[in-house]
Amino acid sequence: MNTIDDKTAGLWAAVTALRHELHRNPELSGQESETKKRLMAFIRTQSHLKIVDQGDWFYALYVPAEQNGEAPVAFRADMDALPVPETIALPYGSVQPNVAHKCGHDGHAAALAALAALLESDPQVRRPVYLIFQSAEETGKGGKPCADFLSETAVSEVYACHNLSGYPEGAVMVRDRLTQCASTGLLVAFHGERAHAGTPEDGHNPAITIAELALFANQLQADQTGRLCTVVYMQEGHLDFGISPGDGAIGLTLRTTSDNDLAAMERALRLRAGQLAGSFGLRTDFTVYDPFPATVNDPQCAAAVRQAAAALGLTVADMPEPWRPSEDFGWYTQVRPGAMFYVGNGIHWPMPHQPGFDFNDRILRTIASVFLKLAETR
């Protein structure tokens, strides 16, 4: 595999150590202050790149001494962890109760930090390079501020990578156009009136309304290919058998292949919830959580990823279907042409968000190699 030369072995030991340090000290979305400090310190130690602190996130900028007039390119990594416990024995296991890097953002951030250390020694990089270290990907809140910043720069293309299990270790996957779905969380609360369980007709119990809306959601996804509506939460009453409850709620995750269809599905659910509430004498309110736009790759940027992988001697594996989980890199591809690509952890590697998951250190070099090749003049 023609990736970065083995004479950088000392760097890769440092990058792996950085990844383990990030894994040991995970931070949830919007709380990545120490993660940010560790990454910034590593970049300062390993490079002369300019570092700009943007509060919740930061970027590093490389400006080569000799430029060829090409517009800047940007690369993005996420750095937040998940609210789940560490369940596997690791020498660098999480020290934070019920918080762990079970999606691999520690690896994404370490790989991008490695790129910072490699840019200055590559004479083929003759355009400015932005390295964006983004917070709060898991909640969908971190991407838009970074994309807004990107829209104010001269950056002409932007790239990101995610590890992906179920594919050969070190293989590169990239799709043209849709690559990850749009999604949002919708909480529908119903408010009625409590009554004695012996005389429920004296109140307004939302139980049937919640059940009817769950059935409607199931039918809504069955009516059109590419829609998914998952019930993630239902609450109504307590284990008090003398009371007919008056309040309840249902939470749903809506997922589609386009932003327009996501909006249409949400409108249909809101309309049906209002109709059901009116029939049962209830009031409703709605709360939206974790909105993610669809991530849509630019075909030319996707082709550039394939060319970079081929030039490095990497396997380019077919990815026939979009990856259903959402990714807030979609905010970036709304303002600049770009591509999200994936590097395989291994066929039988646990999937991200599973308890047994840990990022595969052996693909750190692969991700950074593809980034570097994309930064070079083509």
Image (cartoon, rainbow, N blue to C red):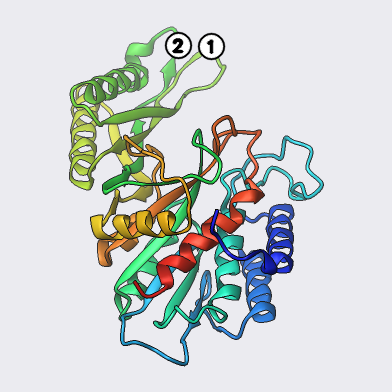
Q: Is residue 31 shown to the viewer in this render?
A: no
- Nearer-the-camera pick, 224 or 274: 224
**With 199 as the anchor, is 133 left or right in this view?**
right
Q: Residue furthest bottom?
A: 65
Q: Which of the two residues, 223 or 340, is positioned nearer the viewer here?
A: 340
Above/below status of 166 relative to 181: above
- At horizontal 69% and vertical 63% (from top left) the residue drawn is 12
Foreground of the two, 117 or 283: 117
Q: Quadrant of residue 278?
A: top left
Q: Position of residue 201 (x, y in %)?
A: 32, 12
Label annotation for residue 197: 2
Expressed as whole percent of the image width and height from the top left, the position of residue 49 reads 56, 83
Give the answer, above or below, for where 374 lies relative to 270: below
Q: Is disc 1 in contact with disc 2, using a CB cutoff of under 8 Å?
A: yes
Q: Is residue 278 left or right of residue 363?
A: left
Q: Residue at x 67, y 78 (%)?
A: 46
| Mark drawn on residue 241 | 1
Q: Amino acid at mark 2?
A: Ala
Residue 34: give x, y in percent of width and height: 67, 67
Q: Quadrant of residue 303?
A: bottom left
Residue at the image point whose x is 25% and y is 39% from the top: 257
Badge 1 or badge 2: first in the primary sequence: 2
Relative to residue 122, is residue 328 drawn left or right? left
Q: Residues within 10 Å of mark 2 (few under 14, many from 20)?
A: some
